[in-house]
Amino acid sequence: MPQFLSTADADFETRFAALLGAKREDSPDVDDVVAGIIADVRARGDDAVIELTARFDRLALTPDTMRFSPAEIEMHAGRVPPAEAAALETAAQRIRAYHVRQMPEDASWTDPDGATLGWRWSAVSAAGLYVPGGLASYPSSVLMNAIPAKVAGVGRLAICVPTPDGEVNPLVILAAKIAGVDEIYRIGGAQAIAALAYGTATIAPVDKITGPGNAFVAAAKRRVFGRVGIDMIAGPSEILVIADGDNDPDWIALDLMSQAEHDESAQALLITTDAAFGRAVAAAVDKRLETLDRRAIAAASWRDFGAVITVRDLTEAAALSNRIAPEHLELCVADPDALAADCTHAGAIFLGQWTPEAIGDYVGGPNHVLPTARSARFSSGLSVMDFLKRTTMARMTPEALAAIGPAAETLAQSESLEAHGLSVRARLNRLNAS
């Protein structure tokens, strides 16, 4: 059973704080192992990647077989049933259309002193996408990572997807093809992250790495950050549903289980103004857990980290939501727009009872790579901005330099940076002499 909390209870703050502080991240101490793997790949390149792939994925590779050939891509993509292929195309079209609208514009203007200022946007030259491998890998994650990169204008996009025992998920290959991925490598783990970051004879290095992975992948991403950019270190999935009593308890139960079934460490929370409705949802969850394919995983998540919280009103609900800062926030209330205005910390918000979070995982359009573990307080989900760089632009005319240069010279002197000030003064002297 999940926890049942009420803001009317005297011990609510203590119990809610404990709920927020529960450690869900499965983060075994793998940093030393990962450091060794990265050092090995940097030193031995392809040979290290091939040996590590044989050890961890039980797959024998050569430099020539690390990358899927065009013929292999066509063969695996062709194995996808037509209905699933059509669904991937629909998802890709919607994801692409949404992210095209995110593209920012360059800007340039001349200020009152005559200086021309502005900025321009440009894409990173190359990006690497990590995709967890095997038959349990997720083609939707390929689309969500690769399409924004391509929309942003990334020139080269490489994917690493491990294939343990040679098992390939055809949907992943087709998703990569649809998204316009340029290179697909059948390697995984920390060795794949190291190869993407530092390069090998076969795999050229990239500028940014995105995509989810296990503890080894997360540790590797932390270690290569700075050499390359990364998207985020994602934790277990989470959902918060705020619902009033005018909902179908079974619908809300299914929405909660849609995240609980991801991982035993996932978290599913319900906040409601109706205590009886909360109990009805919990009962509906119990019934669904009798038949779900992934019931063992979902049940452990619900038992260990789930909660039903009763509040006095939706103002309290919004305040608690902001403290939780959930990855996914469903607002199943009469006026979701009004409530959304008060919910300032969330990775993604789903408005109304006809908008299940699962739509966002696949075909809604917005990205499903979202901040977890309360990081929505200060970060955002993946977007085209993750693959773009902003470069500022400035041009002084003689008149503009004459107007603002003396202030720069004064500040340089105050910081004891003589050459800074002299670089401005030399030009001002030329102006004064003319």
Image (tube, rainbow, N blue to C red):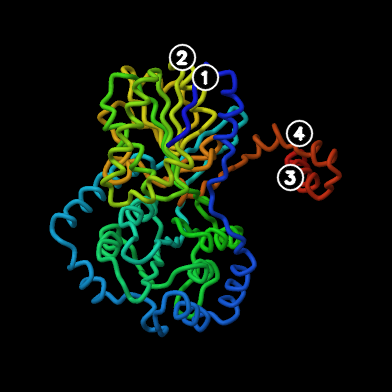
1 or 4: mark nearer the eye = 1
Q: What amino acid type should be assigned to the residue bearing mark 2?
A: Arg
> What residue is disc 4 on?
407
Q: Determine the CA span between mark 2 and mark 4.
A: 57 Å
Specify few, some or many for label 4: CA neighbours under 10 Å numbering under 14, 14-19, or 20 or more.
Answer: some
Q: Which mark is residue 411?
A: none
Gap between marks 2 and 3, in whole Å? 68 Å
Amino acid of disc 4: Ala
Secondary structure of the residue carrying tag 1 is loop
Q: Can residue 384 be spotted in the picture? A: no
Contact? badges 2 and 3 (CB < 8 Å): no
Q: Nearer the viewer, residue 106 or 95?
A: 95
Q: Is residue 175 left or right of residue 161?
A: left
Label pair 4/3, CB-CB below 8 angstroms: no
Task: From this view, report whether residue 38 is shown above or below residue 87.
Answer: below
Amino acid carrying label 1: it is Thr
Nearest to N terminus: mark 4 or mark 3: 4
Q: Nearer the viewer, mark 4 or mark 3?
A: 4
Q: Nearer the viewer, mark 1 or mark 3?
A: 1
* Residue annotated with mark 3: 427
Measured in 3D between alpha carbons, the distance from the residue under mark 1 to the one under mark 4, in whole angstroms, is: 56 Å
Residue shown at 59%/24% (left/top)?
A: 13
Q: Badge 2, how many Cα within 10 Å: few under 14, some, many 20+?
A: some
Give percent across and percent down for residue 158: 40, 65
Mark number displayed over residue 312: 2
Inspect the image, locate mark 3, and give the three-letter code of the amino acid beneath it. Arg
Kindly indicate the quadrant of the structure image that contains residue 38: bottom right
Tell me whether circle 1 and circle 2 mark residues in contact (CB < 8 Å).
yes
